[in-house]
Amino acid sequence: MEQSERTAFIAIVINIIIFGIKYISAIATGSIALKAEAFHTFADFIASLTVFAGLKIAKRKTKSFPYGLYKIENLMSVIISFVILYTGYEIVLDVIDTNITELRNSELAIISLLIAMMITFWFSKYERKIGQKINSPILLADASHIQTDVFSNSIVLIAIISSLLGFQFDKIAALIVVIFIVRTGIQILMDGARVLLDASVDYETLSKVEKIILDTPQVVELKTLTGRNSGRYKFIEADIILKTHNLDRAHFIADKIERITKDEIKNIDQVQIHYEPLQKEETIYALPLTEDRASISPHFGEAPFFMLVTFRVGTKVASKAIILNNPYTRIEKGKGILSAEFLVKNMVDFILVNNDFESKGPRYVFSNANIEVIVTNDELPKQAFEKLGLTFNLTSDSIAVGGNEYAILS
């Protein structure tokens, strides 16, 4: 038996015990408010049975319901809300139809209410804690329902103590109990209805998923992100653009996003990633430069500058160029990986280096981002491009340095 089911079963046992205590005390005292409370607790017993049945059914998947019956929990929460509201209606009828009588055995009623309040308060806290831990709407709904007993019991207790002093507040206490009951019932009804109508998941969850997706180096753009609740579980769907045309690589990236999302966010049932390749009209080459900004640096991570050179698709003559400062040259550890991630964010397609990477970190970053590493023996960018069959007619006046836009070459 799962923790949620065990908690619901405990609720069944507790509610039937408390109902017996209250009902016997109500008969012994003649209190309409206490009698209403007894039937309120009996409604709790019915609700707890509903909770238990809902938890048993909700986790099943069938051919007819391949996405599971998780919404059974929310449907049961709505049913519980109607039970609560009907209980309030029954109490109002009792207030209208019953004449005020002097209470008997008030001490018995006080003792029984104190016992019921202690048990109810403890269990409502326990059930809410478990419901929050496993994110179960049906347990949270039942905890809210049971918690109303603490307030309503307090009102009835005050009315019985007042009767000992000669004040008859029995009917007034019963009506106050109704207010608590109706308020709780409406809140549970609204929460359950939102999920049944496929309302979006909370903003915090969507923000976490968005960060996970955008932190993935191969993701160029997040087009859409939606999510819905189903019982305690969440279903996420995203449309992304990836910097790869390799279907196996794209599938690997989507699986990675799904795995990270499920690991970092509780109760995610499914993450559906729809991906499409980036349609580029330009190809960007990156080269690490030495301090003079003229030669290719033999040290990738320690290079003070990076030159980004753009070629329009279908042409072999450079059309744009920019020189960017390497923001990670003074970092003691991990500068190679950070520099590689910096170039990934700048949408680079190829990286030209004099020496292959000493550590596997940068090459791993480039491989994941589908960036090809080209090792060249040439010191000057022009020579390196010529061996690739590309033309790089570059003058210092035609290169932008450190700006946000590429300079257009003549």
Image: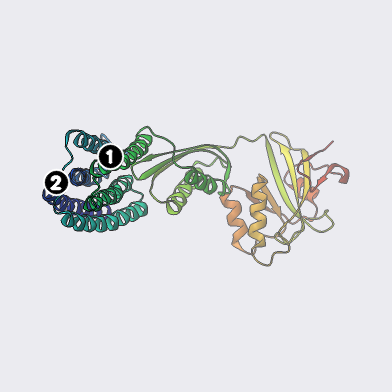
Label 2 sits on a secondary structure element that is loop
Marks 2 and 1, how far apart in space?
Answer: 17 Å
Q: Residues within 10 Å of mark 1 (few under 14, many from 20)?
A: many
Q: Residue type at mark 1: give it.
A: Leu
Q: Which mark is residue 324?
A: none
In this figure, which residue is indicated by the disc labeled 2?
Answer: 30
| Mark with earlier residue (2, 1) | 2
Measuring 59% from the left and 47% from the top, which residue is drawn there? 370
Q: How is the image coloured?
A: rainbow
Which residue lies at the image location 64% right of the left edge and 64% below the top edge? Answer: 358
Residue 13 makes an appearance in the image = yes
Instruction: Classify residue 274 as left or right of residue 167.
Output: right
Image location (x, y in percent) of residue 161: 24, 53
Residue 334 image point, x, y percent: 64, 63
Q: Position of residue 137 (x, y in %)?
A: 33, 45
**On-image quarter of the N terminus:** bottom left
Does residue 37 appear to the left or right of 351 in the view shown?
A: left
The picture quadrant where one finds residue 71 is: top left
Residue type, mark 2 in image: Gly
- Residue at 27% from the left image edge and 41% from the top image edge: 172
Viewport quadrant of the C terminus: top right
Secondary structure under tag 1 reads helix
Q: Which residue is located at x 79 percent, y 56 percent? A: 379
- Nearest the viewer among 93 and 286 is 93
Which residue was labeled with disc 1? 175
Would residue 137 be found to the left or right of residue 48 on screen? Answer: right
Within 10 angstroms of label 2, few (less than 14), some, or many (20 or more) residues? some
Q: Quadrant of residue 76?
A: top left
Residue that lies at the very extreme toward the bottom in this rendered image: 332
In the rendered view, tell whether residue 289 sits above or below residue 83. below
- Residue 1 visible here: no
